[in-house]
Image: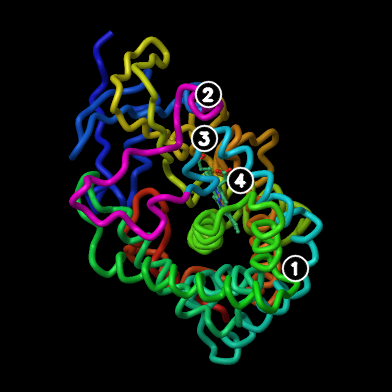
Amino acid sequence: MTEQAYYFNPWDPEFRADPYPHYPALLAGPPRVTILPGAPFALVARYRDAVAVLRDHERFSSIGPPPPPDQYQGPFADSKNVLNSDPPDHTRLRRLVSRDFTPRRIRELEPRIAEIARELIGTAAARGEFDVMADLANILPVMVIAEILGVPAERYAMFKDWSDRIIGAGTTPPGAPPPAEAVDALEAMADYFGAEIERRRRKPGADLVSALVAAHDDSDALTAGELLSFVSLLLIAGNETTTNLIGNGSLALMRNPAQLVMLRREPALLGSAIEEMLRYDGPVQSTARFPKQGVEVDGIEIPPGSIVVVVIAAANRDPAKFSDPERFDITRDPNDHLAFGEGIHFCLGAPLARMEARIAFSTMLERFPRLRLRDPGAKLVYKGSYFLRGLAALPMAIE
Ligand code: HEM
């Protein structure tokens, strides 16, 4: 069998703007091993291969190589967090942080999230203009994280700015130093949360940071650096992803008017519509693993030192798993997508993200009965990261 030509380049803005036409070639065969800037890469796209890698944390580590010694090491160089650790550290950290991130605690946030969504959408409605990103999706998740961390919601603009600058560095080719503005943001975030942790130690509240400080102080189970690293991870992981679910999901709905009509007629389909938004154009396109030694996936040798890129968004359109995968179908059932990952690193914030999306869409559709794209032919502009895919703007017509 001749190898089908494929193209995969997260550093090409054209590829980033629309990676989907490039996925079928990757799905046509087993993993591809290729050299991209800095390292050998193995692209794992087929659903069954992606699941196999994500479930096999014994052979596929979540700990990447450290930056070269002459480069910026970052404020968390010596501190692990759930996302970048393997068992046994991962098991200990996940247990500690899950204790205070339970479905019950998340449900308690529902009224406050609904209030924020109503306020944001009400402000746009009063102005007579609505951009899904600027007026809702960019703001709601970061205000919710601020609420969870127990910091004043007015701080959200500062949080958002740090998060944007740090995520923007995700497009830096491997081995290249991070941009100065990302370094400044990381340092500012670490300083801010360091001080907040101290404040909560002196005067605990009912928030997540206070609970984690207590976990640290009680048994020393969570080191001070790990505590800081987790709080910072929450701000990054829980913010941009949910923003992009609301944005990418709105676009999919507006481009499929029959599905939008069906959802308006049958609001009980919202949960399943959100699962389809996650499958069809998920916020996380790919995640990475680092083989501990030479490994094989589907008969392909992956050399040690490779970066294994698990192309979640391609797996979510694998015809071997999903019938008619290019179709956006809000009634799809079953819909075992990988948008939140798989295995021990499965997204800790999935229940929160689903709830935020549910509230955002129900509030938006109710408030704007004639919602549609303002200019359906306009070229869409995406933000700078391939790994976290999201729109820079999504202007709507509301009358
Ligand atoms: C639609 C929104 C979201 C998507 C698509 C998403 C996606 C993901 C994915 C794919 C992973 C696994 C990464 C890997 O295995 O390498 C992950 C892990 C994680 N996510 Fe999310 N996420 C979302 C929202 C959130 C929210 C709201 C939070 C918290 C407030 C959050 C916190 C985390 C954490 C802490 C991990 C690491 C878990 C572990 O390693 O054990 N995420 N997420």
Tell me which label, 1 or 3, sits earlier in the chain.
3
Task: Rate crowding at label 2 as few (under 14), some (14 to 19) or many (20 or more) other CA atoms within 10 Å.
Answer: few
Instruction: Report how far apart the C-alphas of labels 2 and 3 lie in the structure.
Output: 11 Å
Numbered label attached to residue 93: 4
Prevailing secondary structure class for the magenta stretch in the rendered image: loop
User: Which span of residues is magenta-colored?
Assistant: 51-79
Which residue corresponds to mark 2?
A: 56
Q: Quadrant of residue 33?
A: top left
Q: Secondary structure at mark 2?
A: loop
x and y percentages locating residue 157 in the rendered image:
47, 80
The quadrant the C terminus occupies is bottom right
Q: Which residue is mark 3?
A: 86
Q: Is mark 4 within 8 Å of ligand 1?
A: yes
* Amino acid type assigned to the residue bearing label 4 in the image: Leu
Give the residue at x 40% y 71%. 162
* Disc 4 versus disc 2: nearer the observer: 4
Give the mark count. 4
Q: Is residue 19 above or below residue 160?
A: above
Circles 4 and 2, Cβ within 8 Å, touching? The answer is: no
Question: Disc 2 and disc 1: Cα gap in Å?
Answer: 34 Å
Residue 285 visible at all: yes
Whichever of callouts 2 and 3 sits on the residue coming sooner in the sequence is 2
* 64 falls in the magenta region: yes
| N-terminal label among 4 and 2 | 2
Does the residue at mark 1 contact the one at mark 3 (Cβ under 8 Å)?
A: no
Which of discs 2 and 1 lies nearer the camera? The answer is 2
- Disc 2 marks which amino acid? Asp
